[in-house]
Amino acid sequence: MKPVLERLIQKAVHEYGKRKGLELPAPFDFDLTVTRDATHGDLATNVAFKLAKEVRERPNLVADQIVLLLQQETEKDKKAAILNRIEVAGGGFINFYLAKASLAAVLTEVYEKDSRYGESDFGRGRKVLLEFVSANPTGPLTIAHGRQAAVGDALSRILKKTGHDVTTEYYLNDAGRQMNFLGDSVWARYAELVKFEAAFPEEGYRGEYIRELAAKLLSVKQDSLLHEAPEKRREICREFAKEEMMNLIREDLENMRVSFNHYFSESVLYEKKTVDGTLNFLTDQGHLYEKEGALWFRSTDFGDDKDRVVKKSSGEYTYLAPDIAYHRYKFERGFNWVINLWGPDHHGYIPRLKAACQALGHAPDQIDIRIVQLTTLYRKGVPVRMSTRAGEFVTLKELMDEVGVDATRFFFIMRKMESPLDFDLELAKEKSQENPVYYLQYAYARIASLLKFANQTISPKVNCERLSSNEETDLIKMITEFPKILTQASELLEPYRLTDYMRDLATTFHKFYSFHRIVTEDQELTEARLLLAEATRIVLRNGLELLGISQPESM
């Protein structure tokens, strides 16, 4: 329906441009949106306003000319029988009133495509590497990591649905100072258990999980670490803790329905001399220079506010050096779009890494770095305080245990990722329509129950012109928006758009359900409404699957 109209509008636009002696871009950019007010038609376009800027005429005059051209096209194009009438309104908006049969044809499309409804080739040719979570294995996953996991996983599903070739990756930072602090912390707690005097590191990790790791290490190693050299016992503690924490992290992610194609270890970059090779490459390209014994990256050449050190005068790499090497490796694997979802503490790091990617020879639009803001948990209106280093934090596992995986995922996704999120624990546990995820699942279960009660075979060959009420028309129009919403969410990297849409769809269905009986003595009308209900169920299911949320048949 919309593709047919878009094609007709494009033809009218270029015929208009030809008559005005203008060479307009192809395709010409305009919006064709579903209206929320039936008095404004079913679809509306702002194309006249866009054209008015090109020809310096009033939008309403341009709209009149476009409508005449559209009417001529519809007379020649049999597919344009979807239109009932076209009107100019609002100073230049063009409103389209669709024939009821054309609206209903959408239901047939949804029914026949089923799980494929919403798929597109929008992202064809884009090979995407999506990196998210990438939490240091120095402790359990927190709710901050949980939000990154939910958003990243939903985004990967949406990108795949819209035709992108997506690979997901978790970057395992296992070669930095924080890992040494982890090892030292475990050693200190281990020493306590064996009554050996050892100072707890000032920058160590104090959570109860460190004591648990030390106790487990003691059960495996007994007191053998007392006989090891300091560096050796640090290494043993560090590697043991890393493996144990990664097992817990993988388990939490699996329970959250999040999976990764790859776990990439930072230590590999050093083992394969990738960091040295990358710095040598940048030196040869003239992007690095020495000053005061250190090695500097000319990041100001690519828009950063100052140049950055990649290798200290002591010979130690800064965090930037392995990150540049890692991103070089990303592109070497053939990815042409790299997406990173980071926590807010990395905000200032974005310009220097984007500068590094340009220095490596990649266009600015080949890397997108988005910040996933922090989440504040509220219990009965009071924020739950957290401090990772002190060990006073709510783990992702604890949150999932309390409110469930479905609510955890939905609440994490339902706001724009760049905005801080207030997570209401009480609301997330409510079995009421105030809880948005319960509201969606209730709509799905209500339809499943309805279809079971009807006990009829659904057929796409029904008289859909019987679906003539405002509530039925509004629901059909909402269903048609699903593919566009997925395209927008993937283009803008904003999965929250899908949660907004799903809530609107559920609201529209509940309104339809409250106004109209589905199973009636009128068999023709019943069949049409059952098809409408089934199409709604399909879209709800497809959307919930993309959000990683279950679809209960009863509640």
Image (spheres, rainbow, N blue to C red):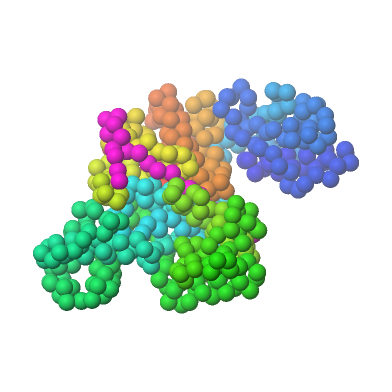
Q: Is residue 26 above or below residue 335?
A: above
- Left or right of 523: which side holds 222? left
Q: Is residue 457 above or below residue 260?
A: above
- Left or right of 46: which side holds 478? left
Q: Residue furthest front?
A: 292
- Left or right of 326: which side holds 454? left
Can residue 293 be seen in the rendering of this structure? yes
Looking at the rendering, in which quadrant would you find the C terminus?
Answer: top left
Q: Relative to the observer, which residue lies in front, 351 or 327?
A: 351
Q: Is residue 60 above or below residue 539?
A: above
**Residue 212: horizontal and vertical position, in percent?**
18, 59
Q: Residue at x 63, y 53 (%)?
A: 303
Q: Residue at x 54, y 39 (%)?
A: 481
**Residue 6: horizontal and vertical position, in percent?**
68, 41
Q: Relative to the observer, which residue lies in front, 155 or 181?
A: 181
Within the magenta stretch, is there residue 379?
yes
Within the magenta stretch, is there residue 489?
no
Magenta span covers which residues? Answer: 363-387
Looking at the rendering, in which quadrant would you find the N terminus?
Answer: top right
**Residue 490: horizontal and vertical position, in percent?**
54, 49
